[in-house]
């Protein structure tokens, strides 16, 4: 062994790497979640539900129990017992069979009422649209004219409507239909039926159309009285159309007639559907309706407790007819309705 040789360690330790100073990073908190902004359409939808909430509550808490009780009465018989009071017994469809096959006047009254209303409803919608288009023009005093056309609607409500209904029922009772106040056939609006029939015969047109025209013209006062709400709805729809659309049509050289059928009529077509359904329901549930009067008379004078259950069955059949007519009108007009896209 060489004494001069340097002693080497058996397990050499590697040199340590230079230590790098640690840099402290600041604590960063997680970003807070922002509340998602509610769109304008959703806020409008919420406002709409808030607006109809009283009606929904009234429907659930007030009307639905009454409707269910009415349907129960239509399937039951009601008798009065001095010890137990009114006794209700389930009898099935006997009240409906009595109204359809035993009562001699209900079916005829129902058909005549439907026939008359199928004439009045198109006349009311067309007349209200015609007046709304005229009152939408920029003429002097148009606000006064709008008020004048809406006055009959105010006069037909409340105590005035009750007086007119009672007067109409009294005139029906005494059998003098020519003096009726509520049926709209006043002398100032009456026409010579023979002249109209002769005119249509000369034009080679059937008597059915002449009967429709005579009925519509004779009832012009009633049509005016029942067109106020529809007129306001059409006015709101007409005023919602952008004037820029009409300016573009004028620049393109479109006539007033073409502008009405190509622009105005399609733009207000949703309101035509609304007014048609509103007019159907309003006409079918009016106190002056012959079917409603017949059901009320059956309830009051239909043989004691039995008249109440039979009248309930008549009311439910009448309700079914109304729903069927509304559904048919909706399906027919739905194919011709134009809805403007708002992207």
Image (tube, rainbow, N blue to C red):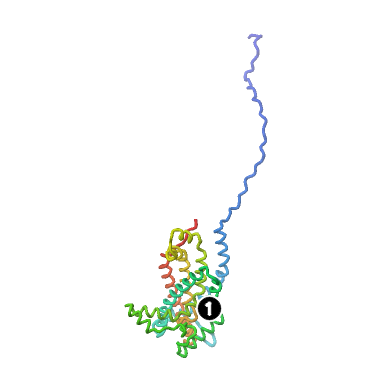
Q: What x and y, as percent, mark residue 299? A: 49, 84
For the residue pair 74 and 124, the one nearer the viewer reads as 124
- Could one spot residue 46 in this view of the protein? yes
Q: What x and y, as percent, mark residue 257? A: 43, 66
Residue that carries the numbered disc 1 in the rendered image: 152
Task: Relative to 149, say whether 258 is above or below.
Answer: above
Residue 117 lies in what quarter of the image? bottom left
Task: Relative to 163, say whether 131 is above or below.
Answer: above
Q: Residue at x 64, y 25 (%)?
A: 17
Residue 52 lies in what quarter of the image? bottom right
Residue 49 lies in what quarter of the image? bottom right
Q: Residue furthest bottom?
A: 174
Q: Secondary structure at mark 1?
A: helix
Q: What x and y, as percent, mark residue 298? A: 47, 85
Circle count: 1
For the residue pair 250 and 113, the one nearer the viewer reads as 250
Q: Residue furthest left?
A: 204
Q: What x and y, as percent, mark residue 108? A: 40, 82
Crowding near pointer 1: few (<14 within 10 Å), some, many (20+)?
some
- Could one spot residue 77 in this view of the protein? no
For the residue pair 136 and 227, the one nearer the viewer reads as 136
For the residue pair 249 and 289, the one nearer the viewer reads as 249
């Amino acid at each position: 062994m060489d004494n001069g040789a340097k002693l080497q360690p058996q397990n050499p330790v590697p040199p340590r790497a230079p230590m790098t100073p640690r840099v402290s990073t600041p604590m960063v908190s997680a970003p807070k979640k922002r509340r998602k902004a509610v769109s304008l359409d959703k806020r409008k939808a919420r406002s709409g539900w808030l607006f109809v909430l009283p009606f929904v509550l009234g429907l659930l808490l007030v009307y639905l129990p009454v409707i269910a009780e009415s349907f129960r009465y239509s399937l039951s018989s009601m008798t009065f017992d001095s010890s137990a009071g009114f006794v209700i017994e389930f009898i099935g469809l006997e009240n409906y069979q009595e109204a359809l096959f035993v009562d001699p006047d209900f079916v005829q009254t129902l058909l005549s009422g439907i026939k008359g209303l199928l004439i009045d409803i198109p006349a009311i919608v067309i007349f209200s649209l015609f007046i709304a288009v005229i009152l939408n023009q920029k003429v002097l005093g148009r606000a006064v004219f709008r008020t004048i056309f809406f006055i009959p609607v105010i006069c037909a409500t409340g105590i005035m409507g009750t007086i007119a209904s009672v007067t109409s029922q009294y005139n029906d009772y005494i059998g003098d239909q020519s003096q009726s106040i509520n049926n709209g056939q006043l002398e100032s609006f009456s026409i010579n039926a023979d002249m109209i029939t002769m005119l249509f015969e000369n034009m080679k047109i059937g008597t059915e159309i002449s009967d429709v025209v005579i009925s519509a013209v004779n009832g012009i006062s009633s049509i005016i009285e029942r067109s106020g709400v529809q007129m306001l709805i059409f006015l709101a729809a007409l005023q919602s159309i952008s004037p820029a659309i009409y300016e573009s049509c004028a620049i393109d050289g479109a006539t007033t007639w073409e502008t009405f059928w190509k622009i105005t009529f399609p733009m207000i077509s949703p309101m035509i559907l609304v007014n048609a359904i509103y007019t159907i329901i309003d006409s079918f549930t009016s106190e002056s309706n012959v079917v409603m009067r017949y059901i009320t008379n059956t309830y009051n004078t239909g043989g004691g407790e039995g008249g109440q259950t039979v009248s309930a069955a008549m009311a439910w059949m009448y309700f079914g007819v109304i729903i069927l007519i509304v559904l048919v009108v909706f399906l027919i007009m739905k194919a011709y309705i134009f809805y403007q896209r708002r992207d």
